[in-house]
Structures are given as C-alpha cells and as structure tokens.
Amino acid sequence: MNIKAAAEKTGLTKKAIKYYESEGLINPLKNVENNYREYSDEDIIRLNLIGALRSLDIPIKGIKDVIAGKKGLQEALMDALEKIDENISYLEKSKLIISSLMEKNPDDYKYSGEQIKKLRETLELSRDNKKELISNSLLRIFPGNFGKMFAVMYEPFLEVKIDNDEKKKVWLKLVEFLDSAEEVDESDYPIEELKDLDDDKLDEFRTTIGNQVKKLLNYDDSIKNTTVNNQIEFVKSLKEDEEAKCSFIRCIELTKKYCKIIKPIQGEFEKYLAVLNENYKKYRENDTKMLLDIENGVKGNLGFGINDLVKSFNEEK
C-alpha cells in the first residue's frame, strides 16, 4: 500500500511515517517501476506500535531499543510507568499543599504567606504542564525537526484547550495543512540547534520564550524604555566585544535559516493559531511595535539602527 493508505490505517501523519523511516524504525520496500514506497502489513503493525508508544511519551530512542531488541517492551512500559508515578506524586503533593492552605484560614495572607507562595508556584507549574501536553501532542504528530521547530517557536501559544467545535475544526485543519506542507530536507534545518533538544532543553526554551511573550503581551512605556535601553547597551557591546559580535552574527544566520523554512507556510499557520489563541494576534501587534521602538531608539541614541548594523555586518563578509 502507498503512504496515504498507511497514514489512514495507522492514524499517523505522512510526515511522521517518513520520519520514522528516516530513523530506521521501518524499512518499506520501493516499487522498482515507480520508485514509490510500498508499505506492508508488517510495516503497519510496527507503525501502530510506534504510535502507541509515542502516545505514552516513550522517546524515539526507547522505541528504537525495543525494535532493535535491546530493550523489551515490558521494560519500556515500566520506564513510562515510572514517569507516570512521578507525575502522580507531584499532583498528590499539590493537592496536599492546597488542602493544607484551605485548612489554615487563607484569608490571613500575612500568616499564610509561605503557603500562598507554594500554592502560586504549584498553580503556575500545573498551568505549564497543560501547555506542555499540547506541545507534546504536536511533537508526536510531527516527530523530528519539523515538529520541534514549531514547538520551540510557537510553544507559548500552544497553551490551548480545544474546548469547542470551532477550535477542533481549526486544529484538524492546522494538522492537515502542516502535513501537506512542502517537504524540507532534514539537513536544511539548523540541525545543531535542534538535534539535541531533549525535554530539559525544550523546557529551557519554553521558559525563556514564555517570559518574552509575557513582556510583549503587557507591553507599555515602562517595558519599552527598559527594552530600548538594553538594546542600546547591547549594540554598544557589539562594537567593543568581538565575541559578542560573532554570537550576534551567528544568530542572524540562524534566523535566516529558520525564515527560509518557515516563511512559505508562516502566514497560513499563524492564521490558524490566531483562532486557537486570541493572545497571538495581540502578541504580533506588540512585537511589531517593539521592533519599531527599538530601531528608532537605537538610531536616535547612536545615529544608526539595528538594520543598519546588520547590513554593515553582511557587507563585511
């Protein structure tokens, strides 16, 4: 059967199937007449197993070990069970904190200061866990660098509950759109930035980007002045610090690589995202405003803008 039929039988996206093949998890035969892949019943069985294990958050490496016979399925499931037990333990501790606070007259905020601090941290972490579930869903549907790229770039806005029919339709259309997007060779991604993104590093990105998003959603004159002043000092450092300059140029090059991959589908993707998360539209508006404020602020203080600086660096090459 062809890849379309394989996707229908397994419920996996075509991109996911191709990724699992690139990782050596399946090895479909090719039709010598048309060079198309032909998926066997054995491939379908294996793909269903892979999909089931990924739905349990078992990593690709763990699945490879199972398929290669390095680890038994029982052992892989036990590893997943341990992670679930850790999550249950965390939830039980959260419940204990909340119950304890409720018993100690939480209206007395001076007496309950430490308990309230713990409660706040617990609620914030619970919120992040919900967000993470949406990101993990995207990563399971689109494993590999394609899914990682979107999870990293848009993760703060994937804190979405598909809680009505309109959002459900939009989410399904978004998945269908991404799966039909033009193929990008894995080597075209900024691979050194993406290949080693494990859960801890993704969490690091999420925290950093999440903080930036919060600032932009609450963008005002105070944040504007701080941001512009920080950028002025940063630009000054580029003139004095060769290491900072090299790092900045590298960031520019990486941005160009990301834009090359995402630009053709960015507009359509963000149209769906704005429906799923209304904050995204506000974020884009404030982001445009902030970039303009930075450009004008730097130029007014130093006599040249960020764009002029980037242009001069490109001319130096």
Image (cartoon, helix red, strand yellow):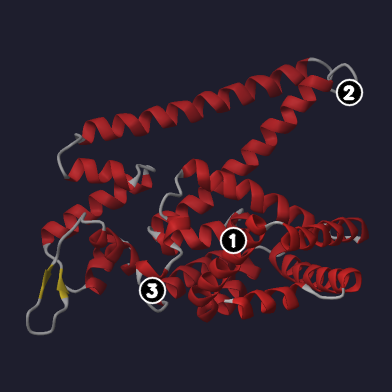
Question: Does residue 219 appear left or right of residue 132 in this picture?
Answer: right
Marks 1 and 3, the one that precedes in the sequence: 1
The location of residue 88, given as percent across then percent down, is: 50, 27
The location of residue 184, given as percent across then percent down, is: 38, 74
Secondary structure of the residue carrying tag 1 is helix
Residue at 52 percent across and 48 percent down: it is 202
Secondary structure of the residue carrying tag 2 is loop
Question: Does residue 36 appear left or right of residue 208 in this picture?
Answer: left
Q: Quadrant of the C terminus?
A: bottom right
Closest to the observer: 252 or 55?
252
Residue at 44 percent across and 26 percent down: it is 85
Q: Residue at label 3?
A: 184
Q: Residue at label 2?
A: 109
Does residue 166 lie above or below 61 as drawn? below
Label 3 neighbour load within 10 Å: few <14, some 14-19, many 20+: few
Please name which of the two marks, 2 or 1, marks the residue nearer to the observer.
Answer: 1
In the rendered structure, which amino acid carries the disc numbered 2?
Tyr
Using the rendered image of the protein, determine whether residue 256 is visible from the camera's viewpoint.
yes
Label 1 neighbour load within 10 Å: few <14, some 14-19, many 20+: some
In the rendered structure, which amino acid carries the disc numbered 3?
Val
In the rendered structure, which amino acid carries the disc numbered 1?
Tyr
Marks 2 and 1, the one that precedes in the sequence: 2
Residue at 66 percent across and 57 percent down: it is 244
Labelled disc at residue 154: 1
Structural distance between the alpha carbons of marks 2 and 3: 55 Å
- Evaluate if marks 2 and 1 touch, with contact meaning CB atoms under 8 Å apart: no
Please name which of the two marks, 1 or 3, marks the residue nearer to the observer.
Answer: 3
Does residue 278 lie above or below 159 as drawn? below
Does residue 291 lie above or below 229 as drawn? below
